[in-house]
Amino acid sequence: MDDDVAIDFYSLFRIYKDGRVQRFAGTDILPPSPDPKNGDVRSKDVVISPKTGLSARLFLPDTTADSSTAKLPFLIYIHGGAFCIGSPFSPIYHNHVASLTAGANVVALSLHYRRAPEHPLPTAFEDAWEAFQWAVGHSDGDGPEEWLNRHADFRRVFFAGDSAGATIAHNVVVRAGVTEGETKGLRIVGMVLIHPFFGNEERDKLLEIIFPTSSGTSKDPRLNPGVDPKLLGRLGCGNVLIFVAEKDRLKERGRSYYEALKKSGWVGKVEIVENEGEKHVFHLMNPGCHNAVTLVEKTVSFLKQC
């Protein structure tokens, strides 16, 4: 085994010359199970594409345990981690999505997309779109996953994500707006972006490594949506909630997205919320703090009221 290092990218990953990748965070795994801290939220793992390994964790609130046939809003959540680390199977994301499931009374799909650097961008964007299309296949009640057939309301679909996951979520919702014919009458109601990892005029060494085919963070609308107002104006939902954190270096990128969306010609409602004194994805690192609880409550309110 060759221990010579080819690329060492800070606290995210290390690539060895023999091709091995070592991740430094987000590798803990929590099995699917009821979460007693969030009521009797049930969860299970599903494989979306056996060919690529694309998979997800599904969450179902305890309100579906009775014989009620009422459908619940459907949330697709996409985890962050700079497109490189993190997983819906980790304790951090399992607990976060379970709390949203219980609080908002939704069916949730937490996506496990293929990660860089083994799978450079735009793989994550394509995986998210494939997962969305897989979900759409349940809108007539005859898809492969019974939880979605029985309980998900495909006229009330939401996307949410944090950091890189927010970037991925945005790209799916834009693509849905551009290709309405591929959604079979499904309706995306809203999108929640938590500390989105968008590009800007600054050079981003990480994105240069994990997205070598991109035209650059300042020119590629997948990374910097504001550079293409016409495309941004076709965002395929009517409500957007954006969170930024005062001490997050990505704060201004979230604000720039907010301003660009308002000027794009998009017909919808957008709100931005800033958490004072907080850093990037603080709500995942310290979920019990006041601002984290408030962030979850605001998200739950958004999912309930839109």
Image (cartoon, grey):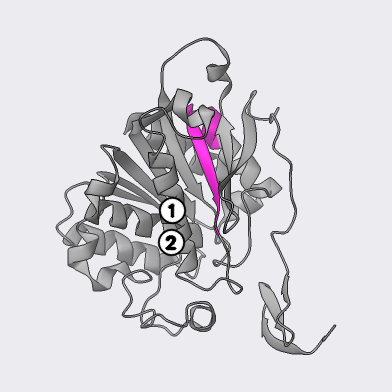
Q: Nearest the camera: 279 or 71?
A: 71
Spot occupied by residue 166 in the image (x, y as percentages of width and height): 44, 57
Q: Nearest the camera: 26 or 290?
A: 26
Using the image, tell me which numbered label, if any, was put on residue 121.
none
Q: Residue furthest right?
A: 1
Spot occupied by residue 156 in the image (x, y as percentages of width and height): 34, 33
Query: How many numbered tags mark residues here?
Result: 2
Residue 179, relative to residue 137: is it above or below?
A: below
Give me the residue at 56% from left, 71% from top: 119
Q: Quadrant of the N terminus?
A: bottom right
Q: Secondary structure at mark 2?
A: helix
Q: Which residue is mark 2?
A: 126
Q: Is residue 196 left or right of residue 255?
A: right
Q: Secondary structure at mark 1?
A: helix
Identified by mark 1, the residue type is Glu
Spot occupied by residue 165 in the image (x, y as percentages of width and height): 49, 57
Q: Which residues are magenta?
A: 100-113
Q: Residue furthest left?
A: 265
Asked whether the viewer can see residue 34, the reply is yes
Residue 47, relative to residue 16: is it above or below?
A: above
Residue 163, relative to residue 98: is it above or below?
A: below
Q: Quadrant of residue 229?
A: bottom left
Q: Dot 1: within a 10 Å radius of its alpha carbon, few (fewer than 14), some, or many (20 or more) residues?
A: some
Give me the residue at 16% from left, 49% from top: 267
Using the image, tell me which numbered label, if any, was put on residue 130.
1
Give me the residue at 37% from left, 37% from top: 157
Q: Does the residue at mark 2 contact the one at mark 1 (Cβ under 8 Å)?
A: yes
Give me the residue at 55% from left, 58% from top: 80
